[in-house]
Amino acid sequence: MLGGDAAGIFEQAGVKLTGVDDERISAASLQQVWRLAVLATDDGFGIQFARSIQPLALHGLGFSWMASQTLRQSLERLVRFFRLLTTAGDIELHEEQGQLRLWFRLPVAAGIAAPASIDGALAMFVHLCRISRGDSVDPVRVNLQRPRPGRDDLFAEFFGCDPEYDAPENCLWFDLNLLDQPLPMANAELARANDQIVMEYLARLQTGSLQQQIRHQVIESLPSGLPDLDEIAQQLKMSSRTLQRRLKEEGLTYKQLLEETRAQLAQQYLSNSQRSIGEVSYLLGFTEPSNFIRAFRRWTGETPAQYRQSPVRP
């Protein structure tokens, strides 16, 4: 819609747009899509993305959101079923002095995720609130960890307030009185039916994507040191032997998954020039930057410095 080569962007990021309906996209690949989309358009892409979203894009969660009794219930469903959308973060809700704070928590340090991906997520939540009520819903405050964008006018227009940039957290703040008003399309039976659809989908996801579960645990553990198979097995509530057996059935090893995850994260982290090589080394679980440099050369054939100096990276 904005004039970018959508198919080319997904192809460059290594994402196939055809396949099984329930196929998931890795967080690292999707972050590349976001960055390439911004390069093809501008830094207001996340807001433009949110404006185009319809409830159907959120699977059964979109329908149960629309059928909720209040916007508070919609946001509570978002928290409960957030893993339907992504396993690369979490949503928390906190009541504070007549307001409800929606906190989008990420398992990586500030500045690692593509800013547009966070812009798009928070703006999407606001957009869905507006669809649910059929009129304007503006947050009281908006906090974004990202620097002030060039299209800051677009952000202020969309949110109905000037967001606080370079904030410590990514948050939306709503008036509780607004969130507790009945919604015009409330339907408890329809909401429950779609809740069940989402729960069944998540059950399939939980049992069918061992690789994704391992990658998620590895990403969370790396800043504290290199996790071994025993630690990951414990986090997944299974024995090491069971984990090894299940990986073998899929033709994989834990070492292979660990290397692939670190390699993808390394390229993602290095695309942010504000991160020093030392910081990236730490985030990937290396004890010394020199060890990281050797590993990165093995993964890509380049040093981290050469990678950063190359033409446009996703």
Image: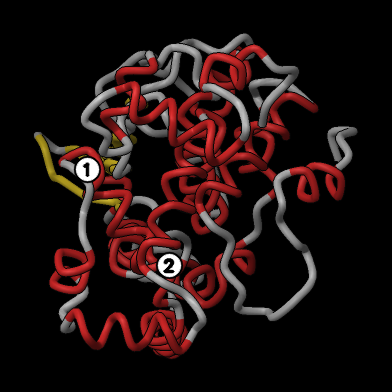
Q: Are marks 2 and 1 in contact (CB under 8 Å)?
A: no
Image quadrant where residue 8 sits:
top right
Q: Nearer the viewer, mark 2 or mark 1?
A: 2
Q: Quadrant of the N terminus?
A: top right
Residue 32: image x %, image y %? 62, 39
**Residue 309 horizontal side relative to residue 27, left or right:** right
Is residue 258 something that shows in the picture? yes
Q: Which mark is residue 55?
A: none
Residues 241 and 146: in front is 241
**Residue 171 horizontal side relative to residue 17, left or right:** left
Instruction: Tell me which amino acid carries mark 1.
Output: Leu
**Residue 215 horizontal side relative to residue 76, left or right:** right
In the displayed structure, would residue 277 be above or below residue 100? above
Residue 28: image x %, image y %? 52, 47
Numbered marks: total: 2
Image quadrant where residue 181 sits:
bottom left
Residue 36: image x %, image y %? 71, 33
Reading the image, the residue beneath label 1 is: 100
Disc 1, SS: strand
Q: Give the residue drawn at x 86%, y 35%.
A: 4
In the rendered structure, which disc, 2 or 1, sits on the residue that comes first in sequence?
Answer: 1
In the rendered image, the residue lying farthest to the left is 97
Q: Give the residue drawn at x 88%, y 39%.
A: 5
Residue 238: image x %, image y %? 18, 83
Reading the image, the residue beneath label 2 is: 212
In the displayed structure, would residue 311 be above or below residue 294? above
Q: Quadrant of the C terminus?
A: top right
Instruction: Tell me which amino acid carries mark 2.
Output: Gln
**Residue 49 horizontal side relative to residue 195, left or right:** right
